[in-house]
Amino acid sequence: MNKKLVFSYVREISVIVFGIAIALLGDDLMQQYEREKISTELKMNLLEEVNEIEKYIVNRENVFIKDKLILTTLINKKTDLDSLMNVKSDKSIYDMSIFGYRGFNPPKSFYNSLVNDGKIRYLESISLNKELDLMHNVNSYYVLENIKLEIVAAQKLKDYFETNQPKIILNSFDNNVCANKYVCDLYLLIQGNDMIKAILSGKISQMEDKIVFLKRYKESLNKIKGYLDTSFK
């Protein structure tokens, strides 16, 4: 075969192969660019939600701790009235701490959409994904589980007071009964009633566990924010 013809064939084939290689490389680069673009946009939106969660957690942590402080102050036999009123002077705050509960529902709609749409893979960070799962699906779960147990204790207290101490319930709604008298009567009643003390102790225990898992949730939140902040540098 003519050497010139062979060379021509080789050159043409080389040009074709090179062209295909360039096209494939260009396609890979384009796909990589698109993935990075999507990843950046998702992380920015996720960071916005994380910032909203951060504000929410500050609020929840404050009220969780204050509610627990009120109950521990009421159950402490060494407490005096002045220290009680220094905690809170609003009757409704005491009612909430004893007969109610604080919910826990941090923003997570964007995270849910990431999981449901399968776009969480674009975050391209095993550490970030693991911490998101730990925060939203583990720590959050244990906070909510302890709230459920706290609700049970709150209902027991409400049932007991309605049956055995209805005057306390009525006074909580009576504007003619000042906060000082209401809290003083409540404190003296608790100090003289082991049944109420026992139920309150159980409620305090659930509050303490709830706060522990809230702190773990907060630790995960800080790590997630650190991962996201680093990815933008």
Image: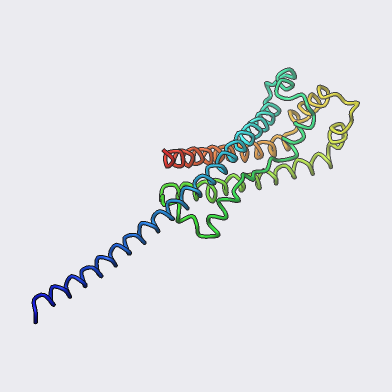
The residue that appears at 13% across and 73% down in the rendered structure is 7
The residue that appears at 91% across and 26% down in the rendered structure is 176
| Front one among 219 and 6 | 6
| Front one among 19 and 149 | 19
Q: In this view, does 94 lie above or below 13?
A: above
State the image coordinates of residue 227 (x, y, percent, origin top left).
Answer: 44, 41
Asked if residue 144 lies left or right of residue 31, the reply is right
- The N terminus sits in image quarter: bottom left
The residue that appears at 52% across and 49% down in the rendered structure is 138
Asked if residue 80 lies left or right of residue 211, the reply is right
State the image coordinates of residue 119 (x, y, percent, origin top left).
Answer: 50, 57
Q: In this view, does 4 lie above or below 54?
A: below
How many numbered badges does the structure rendering display? 0
State the image coordinates of residue 105 (x, y, percent, origin top left).
Answer: 64, 45
Coloring scheme of the render? rainbow
Asked if residue 34 lies left or right of residue 153, the reply is left
State the image coordinates of residue 182 (x, y, percent, origin top left).
Answer: 82, 26
| Front one among 69 and 28 | 28
Asked if residue 73 lies left or right of residue 38, the reply is right
Q: Give the residue furthest to the bottom.
A: 1
- The C terminus sits in image quarter: top left
Q: In this view, does 171 lie above or below 136?
A: above
| Front one among 83 and 188 | 83
The residue that appears at 61% across and 48% down in the rendered structure is 145
Q: In this view, does 219 lie above or below 123?
A: above
Q: Give the residue furthest to the top.
A: 82
